Image (cartoon, coloured by chain):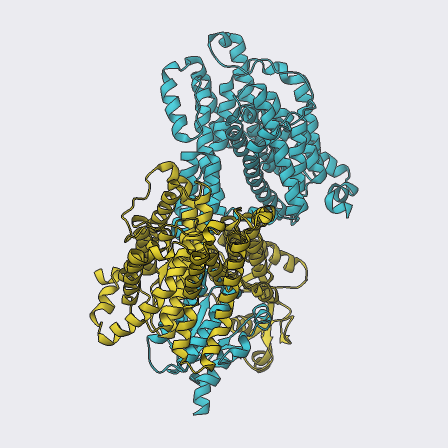
Chain colours: A cyan, B yellow
Amino acid sequence: MIARYLPILDWGRSYNKQALSNDLVAAVIVTIMLIPQSLAYALLAGLPPEMGLYASIVPIILYAVFGTSRALAVGPVAVVSLMTAAAVGEIAQAGTAGYAIAALTLAGLSGLFLLALGVFRLGFLANFLSHPVIAGFITASGVIIAASQLKHILGVSAGGHNLLELLESLWTHLPETNPYTLVIGVVATGFLFWVRKGLKPLLRKMGMGPKLADVAAKAGPVAAVVITTVAVWLFGLGDRGVAIVGEVPQSLPPLTMPSMDWNLVRQLIVPSILISIIGFVESISVAQTLAAKKRQRISPDQELIGLGAANLGAAFTGGFPVTGGFSRSVVNYDAGAETPAAGAYTAVGLGIAALALTPLIFFLPKATLAATIIVAVLSLVDFSILKKTWAYSKADFSAVAATILLTLAMGVEVGVSAGVLLSVALFLYKTSRPHIAEVGLMQDGSEHFRNINRYKVLTHPDVVTLRVDESLYFANARFLEDYILDRVLGSEGIKHVVLMFSAVNEVDMSALESLEAINHRLDSMGITLNLSEVKGPVMDRLKRAHFLEELTGKVYLSQYAAMTELGPVGPAARTAA
Amino acid sequence: MIARYLPILDWGRSYNKQALSNDLVAAVIVTIMLIPQSLAYALLAGLPPEMGLYASIVPIILYAVFGTSRALAVGPVAVVSLMTAAAVGEIAQAGTAGYAIAALTLAGLSGLFLLALGVFRLGFLANFLSHPVIAGFITASGVIIAASQLKHILGVSAGGHNLLELLESLWTHLPETNPYTLVIGVVATGFLFWVRKGLKPLLRKMGMGPKLADVAAKAGPVAAVVITTVAVWLFGLGDRGVAIVGEVPQSLPPLTMPSMDWNLVRQLIVPSILISIIGFVESISVAQTLAAKKRQRISPDQELIGLGAANLGAAFTGGFPVTGGFSRSVVNYDAGAETPAAGAYTAVGLGIAALALTPLIFFLPKATLAATIIVAVLSLVDFSILKKTWAYSKADFSAVAATILLTLAMGVEVGVSAGVLLSVALFLYKTSRPHIAEVGLMQDGSEHFRNINRYKVLTHPDVVTLRVDESLYFANARFLEDYILDRVLGSEGIKHVVLMFSAVNEVDMSALESLEAINHRLDSMGITLNLSEVKGPVMDRLKRAHFLEELTGKVYLSQYAAMTELGPVGPAARTAA
């Protein structure tokens, strides 16, 4: 029982030297990668850089204790940091103490919400974010994040909650561009793009082993940080208007308290729910992808508890909302991390960095951090989902398109909410007007029935068989009534109507009443109503009502049995004749 | 084209003497019944009595021109009047000019909304009100309406927006009860109940014809009105504290203007939408019931236009929100109304009443009107829906119970909204965790496949066949992935998985990606994935993606064909052996 909530008891028992050494190697690589990333995401969230480091320390350890994924690396990620900036920016001015406290509180609320979902096993709620909506949301967020960092590349102050506001504000401040900052920003961005695409092949060509080349490429951002920091220091660019990180306290994560002020909490509830769900969805898809590769299983409800604990940890140790990140987890996995202990070692590494290395980044230009963010998020931007969904399903396309447009035009919260609501509405709309096919017996000698408009099938003039392609419930009950009545009034000589229920997975009370009405009306025209291929669960339910007693026809186990009795066609008819 | 929007052109052409005489008879009967009812519903809505008459005149004529039902009688009805009182009571004090203007405006907004739904053919939206939710809502409304009228029976002033507030307020004011009013109220209520149950059988026993007895029974409220009015006049009870209707202007419906004040409009938008939808649902079910009896058809979208026109008419002629009423329509139908012209003649009758008869009701006690309302609405109260849904489906039961409780406890708007949202949420929840049955071949010599847990069926050890009992979409895509993986990991030696798609009516983009993942994972375990009985529309869509090319197995037309090839059992295996 306890083991259910503490997966660490499971893998901890079989921990050995081999696993330890693998985990340590992975931890070193991930630590190097995480230092600039953590600083950058704090910048993106509008918070002091050290909070990015703090948010990566205790949360990682808590996730290692409570989470089920062996390779997931928890910490600040781009989309969640953007959502944090959007939510907290509504409440306080970036750079103030109130802003930082609101971010802590947001992490605390998010942690509580995730824990509650996990304990009450409500993880399935996240499934209502469809894949296309997520893809669209991440793409649009990537664009906004990249745009929001342009101000650091230009060295101007600009802001806005959506793409238009951002671009307009950038345009207004363009004349104030700082040339030194611009050079640093553009060079760093170009360098990082090149590291991403060109460095690894180059190192390989120079005879470096594939693993080492990979690590070196991942260290690209560190190189950018070191070079630009040294450049700023050497040439005294800080005095020429290049924005630098400045003094960062040398400290392990401090003990902090999220606010209990009801007014603040009330304003943060909705954003915290959205952040939790988006974070959970991002995290679980990464975790499932990595687990599948090693045939491990992860438990969604336990993941909620792991992420909830991590966020609560962030709230009490100077962090902000965190989740399992894609790039850091993949690096962790590729570097050979075997157990969540790798995460704990990474935390130690980051702790050392927070204690010892912070004076070294005094001259680190913000433009470099912005460059690492831009390069990281542009890999998330992928508009091909629009083309893919357009080809496959217009409903999915509408949901993606709405998500992307509204995220860009009105911000992340409106965008993702609209995407979810629209997907659900389109699903409901589709189920409210079900596809109904008239079917007949296939002529291939089988007992199979198919749509008369798609196949050459056998039918009998006395019998109309309709295959209802949807569960019957309140939203389509009246549609079915109208459809059957129209069909029957449209032709002469029908004696039997058979409803083939192979695709009917549910008949609710409203639909039951509609079936009663249909039975009644057909009866008054001298036509019997029959059912075929009714499934177990549906039949169980129908037996609890009076409908089956009043039914003028019969319930047949198979459609073939129904036709054999009501209007023989095909082999059966031939045998009879 | 014009005829589509003007059904009058259809029935008007064939109008003849016989229809005229039938319509006239019906109109006389309905007029007699409507006079006290209209006054009473105005009282219920908190409006001056003449507005009840006005709301029954022009709207009836407009519906006759635009509506499709031959027998529907449009005017104020109990539930809509209650909703009007609830909505307008939030904004203005009953009895003030602002209150009346808000009611006109509400009718106008409701008319516009209904027209818009009709023109854009959105009538299907009303289907999202499930039958149980409607039944629960009407029952709870009936209780609230009856309770709200008790103050008139007691002769005290009391109020409240929900049952508890109403009863508490009544209890506080109980000591102020006016004995004369109480006597009138109780006697009138008793008399009306007796008329409803006992008068018709008595008259029949006394030898009166069935039709005449029916008309006499319907005239009961008129008798109560006449008798109590005369009593108040004779004994001067108006001076002894019995609340009377007082002076009512002698006038045809006046020309009025709904308010264009944006502040007022904004407050009334949500209530007007709820009133429109509830009114439409009530009206269309009455219309469909009556139409079915004569094998006539009504068009839901045109009904919206008819009701929209009627409500706009009410807004401009001193009325308040109206809809097709159950009792008045049934009376109209039973009295032999053949065409909507009967409604127009009723309007003329009511016009004469408004012009000539209003001085006669000066002494009419409000207690009598309250008695007619109580007797009318208690026939709507029917808690048996709770028992019926409990036996049939717990989901339906929850929706009804929530609707009833919340309507009683928090008022009509909250109640009905919660009912709709809960029904939709429960439906989504059910579809998010689909029933999946493992199936095998029936041993009756047929080619039919059924659940292995319900029937003795034949299976082959190499093959797992899962019948997925739900359309596959974002909310259940991951569930399917987990389910199949669990099933396959749970047993040895499986070579083929067949997904029987007979109940899958849709595969959206998210589900497609899940199917791709399943295909991939099974492949890595050396298991093929096959589909059977994929329907036309689903197959069309799958062909637009790469999935079918990557599928490790095949798509079989029927499950029998799949088993014949992958793992023969039953007759096929016997033949082969």
Quadrant of the drawing holding the C terminus of chain A = bottom left
Q: At 55% across and 16% down in the image, what residue appears?
A: A245
User: Which x, y percent locates residue B136?
Assistant: 53, 59
Between A131 and B425, the one nearer to me in the picture:
B425
Left or right? Give the position of A212 relative to A238.
right
Say which of B577 and B230 sits in front: B230
Residue at point 36%, 15% (across, down): A175
Residue A249 falls in image quadrant:
top right
Residue furthest out toward the bottom: A577
Q: Is residue B542 above or below residue A299?
A: below
**Residue sitting at the far front:** B235
Name of the residue lying farthest toward the right: A13
Which residue occupies the foreground of this view, B426 or B102? Answer: B102
Residue B105, x across and y down, in percent: 35, 45
Could you tell whether B452 is left or right of B185 in the image?
Answer: right
Residue B575 against residue A254 in the figure, above or below? below
Q: From the top left corner, tell me how far across and down residue B215 is, in percent.
A: 39, 72
Determine if residue B548 is in view: no
**Residue A551 visible in rendering:** yes
Q: Position of residue B109 (x, y in %)?
A: 35, 47
